[in-house]
Image: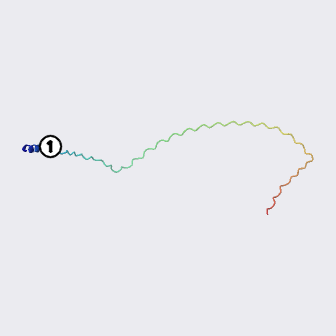
Amino acid sequence: MKHSILLAALLASLGLAACGRPTVVTVPAVNVPVPGPAGPQGATGNTGNTGNTGSTGNTGSTGEVGSTGATGNTGATGKSGEGTTVIVIPPAASAPMN
């Protein structure tokens, strides 16, 4: 029993020694730059060149004038009337409405 207690104590000490403490890794802090206030506005740039004006198109040609049509034949003179009297009646005034 003396040997078993001694052996158990030896194994316990070796087992505890084998389990080491975890190593602590310290990560250095990273400095993040903070932007400062905006600076003054820069000077205005130069104005660009104006583009070229396009060409004017050609004027179209004028059409031709048509020729004058032919004059028709003159009609024959009518016969003189034989005792016919034409009476023209003026239009009647409309009757008053009651």
The residue nearer to you, when weighing 95 against 15, is 15
Q: Is residue 29 left or right of residue 57?
A: left
Q: Is residue 50 left or right of residue 39?
A: right
The residue nearer to you, when weighing 93 against 32, is 93
Q: Is residue 38 left or right of residue 87?
A: left
- The total number of labels drawn is 1
Question: Percent x, y for residue 27?
Answer: 24, 45
Q: Determine the image quadrant of residue 21.
A: top left
Question: Percent x, y for residue 79?
Answer: 89, 42
Q: Determine the image quadrant of residue 76.
A: top right
Residue reaching furthest right?
83
At horizontal 14% and vertical 43% (from top left) the residue drawn is 15
Q: Which residue is mark 1?
A: 15
Label 1's element? helix
Q: Is residue 65 left or right of residue 95?
A: left
Quarter of the N terminus within the rendering: top left
The residue nearer to you, when weighing 28 against 11, is 11
Residue reaching furthest left?
2
Q: Amino acid at mark 1?
A: Gly
